[in-house]
Amino acid sequence: QVQLVESGGGLVQPGGSLRLSCVASTSSFGYWAISWFRQAPGKEREGVACISGTDGSKWYSDFAEGRFTAARDDDQNTMYLQMDDLKPEDTAVYYCGTDRLTRCVPPRAGSLAYPRDRWGQGTQVTVSS
């Protein structure tokens, strides 16, 4: 049973930064594409970033490009999301997840899909002054 545990959320002012972490309970983590996605109240889930498990290629939704940076440390079964220049519209619960495939699905029309197979409990990010 794969478990994913997110942490690092919190309250931050507009323009601020946060670094989220996602720790997986399995070493198979290193083979899988791992994604970050988010869900704001009353809105649908949306993909944020994805890193492939094969070549480490990274993909971002348009709103994240240039502000968010995803990274992974397979030795620690951990994925990170560095979020800079945060905006109030970034307020959401952020999740990491995987479909246990090796490659990310590239964005379509600037939007990443989000995984449907495994995800964690999420971490709340609130951007407010």
Image: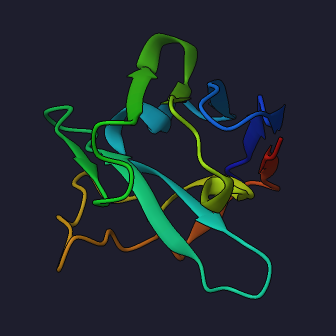
Q: Residue furthest top?
A: 75
Is residue 22 left or right of 97 when viewed as pictured? Answer: right
Residue occupying the point 39% across, 25% down: 71
**Which residue occupies 65% across, 28% down?**
21
How far from the left and from the top, in percent, is residue 102?
26, 51
> In the image, 81: left or right of 13?
left
Looking at the image, how many numbered discs can be counted on the residues?
0
Question: Vertically, is 121 above or below 116?
Answer: above
Q: Quadrant of residue 53?
A: top left
Quarter of the figure with the N terminus: bottom right
Residue under the image location 59 percent in, 31 percent down: 15
Give coordinates of residue 6: x percent, y percent.
74, 39
Direction from residue 56 to residue 74 in the image, left or right: right
Q: Position of residue 3 (x, y in %)?
A: 73, 47
* In-front residue for pair 45/2: 45
**Where 1 falls versus 52 (above or below)?**
below
Report x, y in % for residue 33: 34, 49
Q: Is residue 115 visible?
A: no
3 vs 87, nearest the viewer: 87
In the image, residue 46 sits, relative to residue 18, either above or below, namely below
The colour scheme used to paint the residues is rainbow
Tell me which residue sits at (29%, 46%) in the image: 65
The quadrant in which residue 92 appears is bottom right
Residue 17 image-quadrant placement: top right
In the picture, the quarter occupied by the C terminus is top right
Can residue 89 be seen here?
Answer: yes
Relative to the observer, which residue lies in front, 101 or 11?
Answer: 11
